[in-house]
Structure formats: C-alpha cells, structure tokens
Image (cartoon, rainbow, N blue to C red):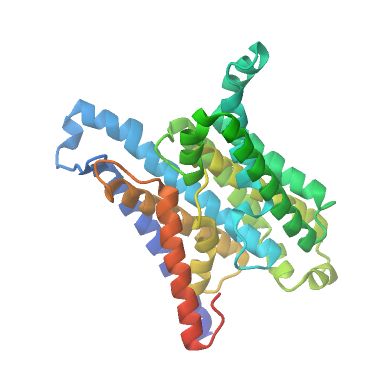
Amino acid sequence: MQGSARHGLRCHALAVALVAGTIVAFALAVVVGVEGWQGGATWWDDPFTRQIVWEIRLPRTMGAWLAGALLGLAGMVAQGLFRNPLADPYLLGSASGAALGVVLVLSTFGMSPVLSEWAPALGVTGAAFLGGVIAVLLTVALAAGVQDTLRLLLAGVVVSTVLGAVVSMVTLRHPGLLAYVQTYLLGSTALVGWVGVVLMMIVWACAIAVVVSTGLALDALGMGEDTARSLGLPVSQVRVVLILILGLTTGTAVAQTGIIAFVGLAAAHMVRSVVPVRHAALAVLSSLAGGVLLAWTDLLARCVAVPSEWPVGVVTAFLGGCYLLGVLHLGKSTGRGAL
C-alpha cells in the first residue's frame, strides 16, 4: 500500500512539473523574440509589441506545445501498439507522405489551369496532412491489414523509402523548391498561426480522449496478442483505431510544423523512466512531456543564434542524439538494458 501511494505521488508530481514547465514556457514566449530577450515590465503598453506577441509569439509557442503534445501522444501509441520503445510516430510513413504532399503541391503551381487552381485551394498544410494520412493508409494496404505487426513495420519502411525517393526526384526536377523543402524537412514552428493552433487543439483533445479510453486495451496488448485475445479483446478493431489515431495526430502535427525528430520517440520513454504507469496515464503524461519538450526547444532555437534562429528540428535531433547516447552509456555502465 505504501509503495502504491509513493507511486501515485511520483505520478502526480511529474504531472505538476510538466504543467509548470508549460506555464513557464508560455510566459517566456512573451518576452523572447528574434533578437533574444525582449522583455520589460510594460511591454503591453506598446501596441506594436503587443501585436507581435499576440499574432506571432503566442500562437507559435502554443503551436509548438500542441505539435509536441500530438507527437508525444503518437509516439506513445506507436510504442504501445508495436511493443517497442524505439517506435516513433513516423514509423508508418507519415513523414515521407507529408513531405511528398508538400512537394507535389508546390511543384504543380502554374503547370496547368486545373492544377494551379487546385493546389492553392488545398494549401501546403492541407497537402502535408493529406499526404501523411494517405501514406499511413498505403502502409496498411501493403501490409494486407493490421493483424501482422511485422508486416506493418516492413510496409512502413518500404513506404517511407519509396516516398522519400519520389520527394528527392521531384525536388531535383524543380530546384527552386529545394530551400523550402529543406526548411520543411528540418521542422519549424515559425509559421504556425491561430488557425493551426485551433486545429491542433481539436485533434489533440479528440485523440487523447480516444487513447485514454483504450488504455486497458493497450495494457492487454503489452502482454502479447494471444493474451489480449484470451481476455476477449478485439485486437484487430483496436489496432485499426490506434493506427487511425497515429495517422491523424502525426499528420496534423507534421502539416503545421514540418518533420520534427526525437520528440515523439523520447516523450513516453522519459515518462516511463521517471514513473512506470499504465497506458491511460502514460498517454496524458507523454502528451504533456512532448508539449514541454518542443515548447522549450523552440525557445532555445530562437535564442541560440540571435538575431537568426535555427530550425527547431535540428535542435531536437541534436539534443535527442545526446540523450540517447547518455541512455546507452548509462545502460552499459549499470549492466541494464538501455531502454
């Protein structure tokens, strides 16, 4: 009983710490601009600065937090679904599909009257979302359903590789796209506005409600598919729902911020390293952790090379590599598994 109380206390302490980290990140977002720290006790008295805060800094930081929350939730779903702590949200090809959608829309401007009208109507974010979802559906189709985990993983690798090659071929045929495509592939929160924030908030709220409601099913799947079926769990139906959530959350985040590495992989792993919890609680904590990670990394990306800024995906990839190296070294020195 005492151990259970201590476990619950650690879980609540982690949730409070993550919420506090979110609040502090939002507070700093008000005073951190393109030239670094731009605070002041009366910044709200300046109409120009107030407009910058409202129209640029706040939606950007909220967008970064929501994108991180979506990726953290998607990473938890992927790791629970495939029973692999190294699974990330892009495992089923959504990143390559989103990149291809962006490249195709940009490359079709002016090619024909029909395409030139269709491409702007869809928009870059719409194309990225649609491309990511189609890639996930293509992976499921190639795997002949969702029953076989290994076939899903292999199909995801194939789809990612092929679509990535197509992105490279289209970019080579249209060299003018290279700079934009590179920025998109490196990830950026600079263009997130209030419309994107509202969209991500709606998707996040719906997705986390579904994942929390399927927490017991994920717990059962963690013990093996045969065990889950013996408990009466409709494994195929649960897999379909989780894969749809995985595609929806990842596609929405990638559509708004580009491809951001590490956050989806690390969020759930960091939570589990602090306190082992069931998947329902893990979904909430992983989502909070992903939001905090990306919000703080975005602030760091703004300040590290003032007056310019680094793509946030570069910073997350660098920090993620250092983190994983540290985990591997710790696992080696203690004689335990790294993950």
Against 321, residue 106 (above or below) is above
Give the left or right position of residue 286, taking residue 119 as reference: left
Q: Is 170 located above or below residue 223 in the figure?
A: above
Task: Name the foreground residue: 160 vs 264.
Answer: 160
In-image side of 36 versus 18 (left or right): left
The residue positioned 67% from the left and 43% from the top of the image is: 163
Depth check: 143 or 103 in front?
103
Q: Nearer the viewer, residue 334 or 308?
A: 308
| Number of numbered discs visible in the structure rendering | 0
Outermost residue, top side? 113
x, y (%) of residue 38? 19, 42
Q: Quadrant of residue 56?
A: top left
Residue 282 placement, left or right of 44: right
Question: Is 193 situated above or below 241?
Answer: above
Vertical comparison of 54 with 239: above or below: above
Q: Residue furthest left?
A: 41
Residue at horizontal 54 percent and vertical 49 percent from the top? 70
Residue 145 x, y percent position in the rendering: 83, 52
Residue 102 seen in the current view: no
Is any part of residue 45 visible from this angle? yes
Which image quarter holds the C terminus?
bottom right
Q: Residue at x 42, y 34 (%)?
A: 191
Residue 54, given in percent of the width and then of the height, sits at 32, 33
Q: Name the image quarter holding residue 137.
A: top right
Q: Measuring from the top left, give residue 311's x and y in whole percent.
A: 40, 45
Q: Quadrant of the N terminus?
A: bottom right
Residue 24 placement, left or right of 6: left
